[in-house]
Structures are given as C-alpha cells and as structure tokens.
Image (cartoon, rainbow, N blue to C red):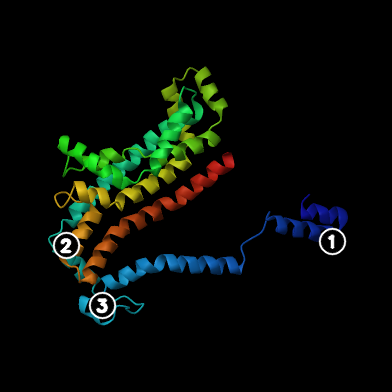
Amino acid sequence: MSSPMAQQLAGKGAARHIRRAEGMTGGRRRPGPVSYALLTVILIISVFPLYYAFLLSTSTAQNIARNPLPSLLPKGHFMANLSRVADSGIPLWQSMGNSVIVAVITSASTVFFATLAGFAFSKLRFRGRNGLLAFVVGTMAVPTQLGVVPLFIVMSKLEWTGKLVAVIVPALVTAFGVFWMTQYLSEALPVELIEAARIDGCSMIRTFYHVALPAARPAAAMLALFTFVGSWTNFFWPFIVLGATTPTLPVALQLLQASYFKDMSLIMAGVVIATVPLLALFAVAGRHLVSGIMAGAVKG
C-alpha cells in the first residue's frame, strides 16, 4: 500500500510508518550528503593522476627538475611540448593509427566470436560442453608470459613479425570474453525465444543473429569497451613482435621515453595524447553503455 492511500484510509500516522518502512528497505531512498562526499573524494583520487600528467605536460624540463610537484594550475607550454613530440622522430601519429586498427578489429572480433561461443555454451546441448568450457576458463590461469616464446616462433614461421597481423590474430577472441558472454546469455536469453525462432523456420545462425545478438547487446557493449581499452594500452606483446618498425602507441611512448628519459614534460605530453582517445570513447559510449546495461537488467 502506498503512503497517500494509507493516509486516506488510516491517517497520517500510518502514512509516516509506511514512508519510514520504504526508506529502511531502500524503495525510495535517495543518496545523502555523505554518499555524494564519498563519491567526490573517489572521483578526485581517480582523476588526479591524469591531471598531474597534464600539469607536467604543460611545464618544462627545467621547471620539473626544480619542482617535481608543480602548482595545480597548468602552465603555457603544452602546445610547444606537442610540437616537440611531433618532431622527436618517433612515428607517433602512425603508431596511433596502428593502435586504432588493432583495437577496433580485436574489439569487433572478440565481441562476435565470444557471443557466438557464449550462445553455444549457454543454450546448446552437445557432448563435452561443460568440459570444454572449463578448459577455456582454465586457460585464463596460464600467465601470458609462458606463451610468448612459442607464439613468437609461430609468428616467425609465418613471417608475421613486424606486422600488425601478429598482434591482431592472437587477440581475435579471449577466454574471458567467452566466459563473460556465456554467463550473461545463460540468464538473459530465455530458451523459449530460441524455440519460437526455430519453430518459425529460422536456422541456428539466423536465430543467433536475430535473437541472441540483440539480447547480448548490453554485455557485448561492455566487452567491446574493455577489449578496446585493453588493446589500446597493451604493451608487452606488441613491443616484442613489432618493435620499432610498426609500433603501436604504447610502444612509441616507450621509444619516446628511451630517447628523452629525463624530459618528463615531453613524455607526459605523449601520455596525454595517448589518453585523450580513451577519454573521448568513455564520454561518448559511457551513457549508452550504462543505459543499455540497465535496460537489459530491467528486461531480464
């Protein structure tokens, strides 16, 4: 019973009691000043490292050497540092294009193949399904460094070293993506929808395209975003297999640091350039991501 109805039937005392009960159960409870203060502190702690990097990028090497903790207001040398980064001999813009190519392809392929595998593991019945899923999940316990040597040998045999395909192909699908989509589709996709599509004459591929993919959209958006960020910031394997020939952005920043290991203003300017696309991605996709997740949760 709502509080207005209770006030009409039983008086204001009963209405206050119901409102108090709703507040205790969290039905209509709104965040208070303590919650906003805590969120503000967490936001400041999270943003400050990036802002500190931006402050260093607006300063000079001499000022940073004299005062490693600059003032909270940016200086006026940011554009000059960007020009120095562009003239440093490091293929920064080429490496940014390489990072975009790798991140977009790996994100799209991971979402597609992980959703396809998650649909099969969660809704199809075949022999060895549980054992195969356990094997896929178990591969996440193997450190990446253990597979670097045999993977590099394979890339050398295929003559892919120094090419972007050597970074793209091993990341076309991930065990975490398969596990993530399997867990989501097992709850978000009713079996009745699959049966209805099959009765209407859809093949299994059309059922996956018209039924499973729309149901997996919120989880697929999260997986695509996290995969893009992970691919954009990946340094270990691209540094080994690509080197300085066709570097991605983290590898180019490492080369910049090797050339100017004491010029923190120049290094931080490169870091800011590498971070801006990720911030733009979160600014554009963040609201749609959260709304998609909430819509999927309500519909489920």
Secondary structure of residue under mark 2: helix
Circle nearer the viewer, 1 or 3:
3
- What residue occupies the far bottom of the structure in this picture? 66
Provide residue 190's location: percent of width, then percent of height: 56, 30
Mark 1 or mark 3, which has the lower sequence index?
Answer: 1
Q: Nearer the viewer, mark 3 or mark 2?
A: 3
User: How many residues crowd mark 3 within 10 Å: few (<14), some (14–19), many (20+)?
Assistant: some
Q: Position of residue 177 (x, y in %)?
A: 41, 40
- For label 2, the crowd category at 10 Å Cα-Cα, with few meaning under 14, some 14 to 19 and many 20 or more, is some
Q: Which residue is mark 1?
A: 13
Type of residue at label 2? Answer: Ala
Q: Earlier in the sequence, mark 3 or mark 2?
A: 3
Q: Earlier in the sequence, mark 2 or mark 1?
A: 1
Tell me the SS state at disc 3. Answer: helix
Disc 1 crowd rating (10 Å Cα; few below 14, some 14-19, many 20+) is few
Q: Which residue is mark 3?
A: 64
In this view, the residue in front, 36 or 200, is: 36
Question: Residue 281 placed where, x, y %?
Answer: 36, 53
Q: Is residue 281 above or below residue 166?
A: below
Residue at point 24%, 39% (across, down): 150
Number of numbered callouts drawn: 3
| Residue type beneath disc 3 | Ile
Can residue 210 be seen by looking at this rendering?
Answer: no
